[in-house]
Amino acid sequence: MSVVETASPLPASAALNEHDATFRRVVWRIVPCVTLIWFLAWVDRVNVGFAKLTMMSDLQWSDAIYGAGAGIFFIGYFLFEVPSNMLLQKIGARKTIMRITIGWGVVCVAMAWVQTPGQFYLLRFLMGAFEAGLQPGVILYLTYWLPAHRRGKALGLFVSASAISLVVGSPLAAYIMEMSQGAFGMQGWQWLFIVEGIPSVVIGIVAFFILTDLPSKAKWLSAREKEHIAAELADEDRKLGPREHSFFASLRNGKIWVLIAVFFCIIAGNATLVYYGPSLVKEVGFTDIKTLGWVMSGIYACGWGGMVLNGWLSDRRQEVRLHTAAAAAIGAAGLLLAAYFVGEKNAAGLIFSLALSSAGTMGAIPIFWQLPGQYLSGSAIAIGLAVINSVANLSGYFSPQLLGYLKTTTGRYTQGLAGIALVELLAMVLIICFIGKRSMQK
């Protein structure tokens, strides 16, 4: 998909302020909308972690059933993510985002009436299938509007919505469950799915009217502003030099498989935090749902801080490789400490460990997404982003199941947490050993 038809040369440095003003306008138009959508996506994706606190006993389910249901989301993600990004190239971002958002919102509401494990598995699968393509689709969409040296902070803000959703969503979920318990004969966890699913349907419709597929189609930009965008994107393309445009040819490049493995390891840690964080905190004595919600809010606030800080540092130093590796290592260290402190029933130690892991693991994610563009371009990056995300997110299927299985069989979280920590640490090793340095210079 072509961003624009023509591109004028970059202006002298005296006109830099004019360019900055154009891109500020682009960011304020696009980023708040897609960030809100990603916020709601995460609210609806992980509210099952709070629903679990009472849903499990109401329906008489085991940790193994919950782990399988939490994880099967990623099977739907895996199967439908590449087709979603291919469709985005054909019909545009705003139609694709509207379809995705309305679809998962409807499924979230339907979760309120689940009664059997089979229904639970089916709806979680459908939620993954509908949400598939959102994150790589938005990342691809931003490449149509922003060059890499302007994209880091935008990506950081967008991806940080997942952490913000956990900061806000944790106490919100607790209050919804407690305040609505028994209303109209329904349980609090049922109302949680209904109340949090409806806004997604609404924002899906609104996004269609706010977003524009390409700069060349933006009626809210002047001709000169469109030239600014075209010039910087063309300049970036020249500086990066030859890159693979065919995705299937790119599969012969070992770097793509390394990137898949790196993100697989990072997501293993992230899925553990979001699907089992509340259960781990409950394990060390926080049984009041509202108190637990605020504790998790503080933990996830550290994740948001890690995303924003690491994005800022990466942009300032114009480096992504080591910033991704270091953040993943910090995330792994936090999980190793959590494995120890949960076994010791040390509440303060566990909360510190989860906060540390949250800051590192979530801080690695937005910076990681700068790496694929250094090896792919054209249609290859559209499909490549989806493949990397979908395959790597399969770790979100395996890690909750592993943790649920070990908790059911051993009665402890220690072994599962330690194992997942080592997996995440592998991300740092892979980056250092196999991902080379490339410039992000303006």
Image (cartoon, rainbow, N blue to C red):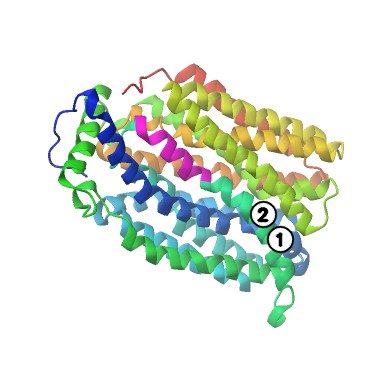
Q: Quadrant of the C terminus?
A: top left
In magenta segment, residue 380: no
Main SS, magenta region, reads helix
| 250 displayed left or right of 74 | left
Q: SS for tag 2?
A: helix
Can residue 145 be seen at all in this image of the molecule? Answer: yes
- Which residues are the magenta region? 149-160
Rendered residue at 61%/44% (across/down): 271
Label 2 amino acid?
Ser
Q: Quadrant of the N terminus?
A: top left
Rendered residue at 66%/60% (across/down): 172
Q: SS for tag 1?
A: helix
Whether 102 is drawn above or below 323: the answer is below
| 427 displayed left or right of 99 | right
Rendered residue at 55%/27% (across/down): 427
State yes or no: discs 1 and 2 in contact (Cβ < 8 Å). Answer: yes
Whether 353 is drawn above or below 3: the answer is above
Q: Position of residue 39 (x, y in %)?
A: 52, 53
Whether 43 is drawn above or below 8: the answer is below
Quadrant in the picture for residue 69: bottom right
Task: Check disc 1: other Cα within 10 Å, few if <14, some if 14-19, many if 20+.
Answer: many
Q: Position of residue 177 (x, y in %)?
A: 71, 66
Whether 95 is drawn above or below 273: the answer is below
Q: Position of residue 420 (x, y in %)?
A: 66, 35
Quadrant in the picture for residue 25: top left
In magenta segment, residue 156: yes
Q: Position of residue 302 (x, y in %)?
A: 64, 39
Q: Name the residue tied to disc 1.
A: 174
